[in-house]
Image (cartoon, rainbow, N blue to C red):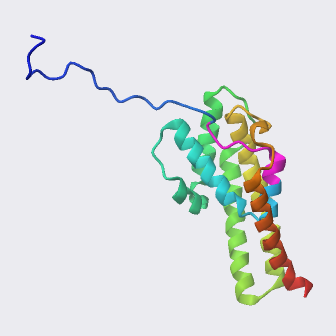
Amino acid sequence: MDDNLYAPPASRVVDPAPVATGAAFYVVAPFKFCLLFFATLGAYQLYWFYMQWARYRRHSGETLWAVPRTIFAIFYTHALARRIDQVLRERGERYDWSPGGTATLFVIAQIASIASDRWAARMGSPLADFLSIAMLIPIGLCVMALQKAANRASGDPQGEANRRLGAANYVWLAVGALLWLVLLSDYLV
């Protein structure tokens, strides 16, 4: 019977379960994160959100698009916070934080920042400019809270695996310095 040319294949075809590989999330040291976030006037968060979703996708095997989740971060921050918290619980980590509260504060601060940017563009108000820049603080603190939880969920609470500045980080810092100069040039002249 083994020589039957018309017999169906005897091999068993199975969809393999996704294999968790590497860190579940993007790991970065708190100081490095703060430096890059504030030096770039928050633009670093675009890279940060993309890396979080890309690493999670690779780790979990879940089908998701990192780019739209980055562009529309205010709609996906709660989902990211829930996934970070889920991985923390799966690892048996006890971490005292409020994923939903952190995500909600981020969304509110982000919307307030966007609104003050629009206000500044229409009215030319220095107060609106100041408010927009001031909103970097709560936004940065919220994203930092997410980062600390992501570091812990990835097994590197201090972010030691990504604490040194590399060439790309210096490029980010140079771009950030230009952004700050453009911003401050309106007030220095």
Which residue appears at 76% of the width and 54% of the height?
167
Inspect this view and state whether residue 5 appears.
yes
How far across and down, in percent of the image, does residue 81 sit? 63, 46
Residue 139: % across, % down: 75, 59
Q: Quadrant of residue 104?
A: bottom right
Residue 75, by quadrant, is bottom right
Regarding residue 142, the answer to whether it shows in the image is: no
User: What residue lies at 54% left-to-right and 53% top-to-bottom?
Assistant: 66
Please tell me whether residue 29 belongs to the stretch shown in magenta.
Answer: yes
Is 145 on the left-hand or right-hand side of 23?
right
Q: In which quadrant of the rendered view does residue 134 lie?
A: bottom right
Q: Residue at x 70, y 28 (%)?
A: 93
Q: In the shown orientation, is residue 1 left or right of residue 67?
A: left
Q: Is residue 116 above or below residue 55?
A: below
Q: Position of residue 7 (x, y in %)?
A: 10, 20
Residue at position x 63%, y 31% in the image? 89
As drawn, 174 above or below 154: below
Q: Residue furthest right?
A: 188
Q: Tell me: 186 left or right of 153.
A: right
Q: Position of residue 145 (x, y in %)?
A: 75, 47
**Which residue is at the front of the view, 4 or 96?**
4
Question: Looking at the image, is 107 positioned above or below residue 10?
Answer: below
Q: Quadrant of the N terminus?
A: top left
What number of labels is visible?
0
* Residue stretch rendered in magenta on the structure: 24-34
Q: Quadrant of the C terminus?
A: bottom right
Is residue 141 covered in magenta?
no
- 145 left or right, relative to 67: right
